[in-house]
Amino acid sequence: MVERIEFESSNPFEIHHILKHLHKTPKQTVFADLHLPEGDGPFGCVVSSHGSRGWSDHHAIHVANWLDAGFAVCQIHSFASREVDSVVDNQMFVTHAMMLADAFAAQSMLANDPRIAKIGVTGWSLGGTVALYAAWKPIIKAFGAEPFAAHLPFYPAAHMRPVVQDWSTAPMLILHGDADDWTPLHFVQGLHPQIPHMELKVYEGCMHSFDSLEEKKWLDDAICIKTRTVKISAKGHMSGIWKFGIRFPLNEPRHRAFAFKILKNVGAHICGDAEARADAMERATAFWVSHLA
């Protein structure tokens, strides 16, 4: 059974705005599809966020697997709610901060549904970034939320480095390919020491969207990340380093637009892998059984 639900979210452009100006950010009505398994519940529930290309066929397979295992799935439509189709070539229309707001708003609504028990969070690529940084306690506190019970990011962009290393102790499993040139694995590996309870499963030779059914494809307009990280200070200010150790701000839309212009990090591969896909499907379902059942 599928129910269309609506809830009030907001449009913070960056994590900086979540931490410092959330009360000033414009409100946003967001809708989602709540998939419910057979039975009376209460059910463990997976709040799910899509990637830069929106919802795809392989996401539907994951959802079906989790329903079969007895879990509810809340499939958030962050793009469609804002009348956006894709942000592959423009990461300004809908940001990970906006999608974080959506995920916590969905959690707040579901927590009051008697059919729903423990709530976990997952996402792919851009949505994986949401599922990852939703475990950072300053963000949880800013939203006045409870921690998610478990986190399952698929190949997230993990390039942000908080100075305040305070993370939820909820279990986290990240699934990532070591040949990913869109959201490279080294960012996750660099963040790993901050999150000691994180488990990382690496698929050798696998690219971005390894759990998809797609053949190898080059996306020449995909905005990607390469080597530079983004620092989040103790006061919530975001910045990056350019040449000669010069640090520039990354709080506002104009800052991000400038960074895209000077860095020109464009172009990435996607490619499904049958063996990795099968393992990821099984591993993801087992993760929810262990932590949301």
Image: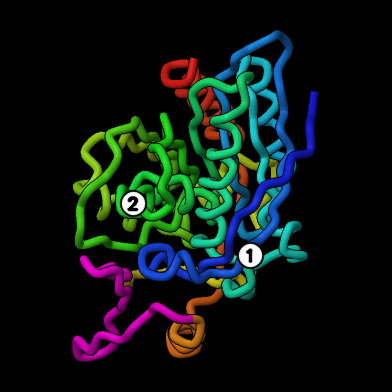
Circle 1: element type = strand
Q: Give the camera-side residue of 182 and 21.
A: 21
Please identify the residue farthest to the top as the structure is shown.
39
Q: Residue at x 38, y 56 (%)?
A: 158
> Which mark's residue is nearer the viewer, 2 or 1?
2
Q: Give the camera-side residue of 257 and 219.
A: 257
Q: Residue at x 63, y 19 (%)?
A: 115
Q: How many marks?
A: 2
Q: Position of residue 285 (x, y in %)?
A: 54, 22
Give the quarter of the figure containing the N terminus: top right
Residue type indicated by callout 1: Trp
Q: Position of residue 18 (x, y in %)?
A: 42, 63
The residue that mark 2 highlights is: 188
The residue that mark 1 highlights is: 218
The answer to whether residue 220 of the structure is visible from this angle is: no
The part of the chain drawn in magenta is 229-252
**Colour scheme of the rendered structure:** rainbow
Does residue 276 lie above or below 20 as drawn? Answer: above
Residue type indicated by callout 2: Val
